[in-house]
């Protein structure tokens, strides 16, 4: 597989662009969203590049498990373990970065306006 050198999140993983890393494990890293939608808004991404969560699940269940474990760890550290985890899949769903990422949202009573 060729390296997706134009991928922003691959650059965060590689360390060639700076970001505030708030957690990491063997197969995933977590960093703050640049445009937070809640007091806690962290993105969790696999170190390897996959376009969306279904592709990740099919190709590397271990990496998906690490992404979810890291989301839980960040939420325990920053939001008492109460959080929402969102994977937008496809442009119509709001996906704008095509390196799969889970949004960890918390730190307040969340509303529900997904559409
Ligand atoms: P999505 O729209 O689900 O693909 O989510 C992409 C997220 O990446 C958005 O919430 C953006 O605010 C966030 N984002 C874009 N650029 C950066 C950046 N340089 N650092 C951190 N988060 C970013
Ligand atoms: Zn990538």
Image: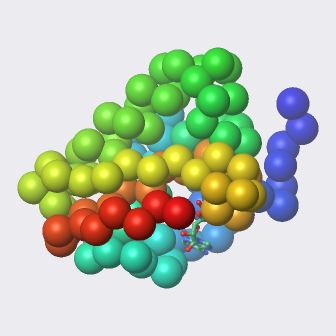
Residue 83 image position (x, y, % from top left): 24, 53
Horizontal side of 44 relative to 99 (left or right) equals left
Q: Residue at x 15, y 49 (%)?
A: 81
Q: Would residue 95 be found to the left or right of residue 104 on screen?
A: right
Along the line of sight, the residue nearer the viewer: 30 or 114: 114
Quadrant into which the N terminus falls: top right
Q: Nearer the viewer, residue 14 or 9?
A: 9
Residue 60 is situated, as x and y percent measured from the top left of the image, at 60, 21
**Depth order, front residue of 6/105:** 105
What residue is shown at x 58% (from left), y 24% (from top)? Answer: 57
Question: Can residue 83 be seen from the camera position used here?
Answer: yes
Quarter where residue 46 is shown: top right
Q: Residue at x 50, y 78 (%)?
A: 34
Q: What is the image's colouring? A: rainbow
Q: Could you tell whether 33 is left or right of 94 in the image? A: left
Rendering quarter of residue 26: top left
């Amino acid at each position: 597989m060729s390296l997706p050198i134009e991928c922003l999140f691959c650059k965060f993983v590689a360390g060639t662009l700076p970001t505030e890393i708030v957690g990491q494990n063997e197969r995933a890293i977590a960093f703050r969203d640049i445009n937070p939608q809640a007091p806690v808004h962290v993105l969790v991404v696999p170190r390897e590049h996959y376009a969306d969560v279904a592709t990740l699940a099919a190709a590397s269940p271990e990496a998906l498990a690490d992404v979810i474990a890291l989301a839980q760890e960040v939420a325990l550290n920053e939001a008492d373990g109460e959080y929402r985890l969102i994977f937008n899949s496809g442009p119509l769903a709001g996906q704008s970065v095509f390196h799969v990422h889970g949004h960890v949202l918390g730190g307040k009573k969340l509303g529900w306006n997904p559409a």
